Image (spheres, grey):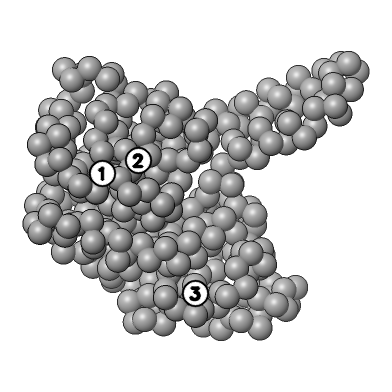
Amino acid sequence: MPKKVRIALDAMGGDIGASVVIPGAAISLTRHPDSEFLLFGDSALIEKELANHPALKAVSKVIHTDVAVSMHDKPSQALRRGRKVSSMWLAIEAVKKGEADVAVSAGNTGALMAMARFCLRMLDGIERPGLAAIWPTTRGDSVVLDLGATIGGDANHLKTLAVMGSAMASALFDLARPTVGLLNIGVEEIKGGDEIRDAAELLRKADLPQLEFVGFVEGDGIGRGDADVIVTEGFSGNIALKAAEGTARQFAEYLRNAMARTWRSRIGYLFAKNAFKAVRDKVDPNKSNGAVFLGLRGIVVKSHGGTNADGFAYAVDVGYDMVRYDLLTKINQMLNRDGQALPASPAAQEAVS
């Protein structure tokens, strides 16, 4: 384990860039004082923000670049224009060179996936990455993947996601054998497309020692925490994620309106303020920010592009935890525990945003 966790940040990534990335890093530093930072981007903008955070400045190195990947760039465009010169690429490359332990970016998802894949390469036996995040549930937390690294996937790809997600859950939740469910339109064995039924059959027959396959999980089972790991392909996973975030914001708006409707409700809110705050914190998407690209020869964390400083800090926290929990070693151990390389999956389509 490194004495310091070295974190490379794409300071230009996201909807706002350095004005969110730098304050977010400063917040994370207060929680993890054994962190050091490499900040890639426009040095003038970064230094301006760092002036407000002397503790962060003392443990940071700024690397200037004029090039930033746009949120609207297609992955192929980002690679052509930003390879070796953009703040996103340089942050990822720092991990490849061993100068950083993890890279964090709030930039374009498809571009980040393409650059990370091109720069870091995939682990042996894995053809396609998965984007995994911690999902709050009524019984605690679950790991859900793929949330949009690639679109579609055959049975072997879903099996690979199950193994990698189990490694992440095992590391984060200290579980010897995490439970795994496949997201489906029903729990019956006859439900769903061929690829998901085939994946279920593969997982049952494999009887992998590192995970316990519990069958199919419906959409409402994610929030219930029906399994420690919920596996799906990237298209439906991204839709599930965005639907959950939208529902959380809708619920919060309903709650605010209800509490302000009458003087009785406002008085009631004063008595129940702490309880309402606990609910709001639980469903706040910013507090669940930070998804990990699994399957790469390095750790890369994706933050929401429109997050605030608090939200970006949580993404940095996720990166820190992945290093401290030695995620890559855990994944390698689980992939090779049965002594067999996983079969490669077909080439992926572009990532969803």
Query: Where does label 2 land, which residue?
Result: 229
Give the residue displayed 17% in from the left and 45% down from the top: 208
Among the 4 quarters of the image, the one containing residue 216: top left
Question: Is residue 168 left or right of 306 when viewed as pictured?
Answer: left
Image: 259 above or below 165: above
Q: Tag 1: residue type?
A: Leu
Q: CA distance from mark 3 to mark 1?
A: 29 Å
Does residue 338 appear in the picture of this structure? yes
Q: Are marks 1 and 2 in contact (CB under 8 Å)?
A: yes
Q: Position of residue 89 (x, y in %)?
A: 38, 71
Ranked by sequence position, the earlier of labels 3 and 1 is 3
Q: Tag 3: residue type?
A: Val
Ranked by sequence position, the earlier of labels 3 and 2 is 3
- Secondary structure of the residue carrying tag 3 is strand
Give the residue displayed 50% in from the left and 33% down from the top: 139
Query: Where does label 1 land, which residue?
Result: 211
Image: 349 above or below 124: above
Q: Which mark is residue 134?
A: none
Q: Position of residue 272 (x, y in %)?
A: 80, 27
Query: Where does label 3 land, which residue?
Result: 5
The quadrant in which the N terminus is found is bottom left
Question: Is residue 16 left or right of 236 when viewed as pictured?
Answer: right
Give the residue displayed 89% in from the left and 22% down from the top: 267
Give the residue displayed 12% in from the left and 32% down from the top: 201
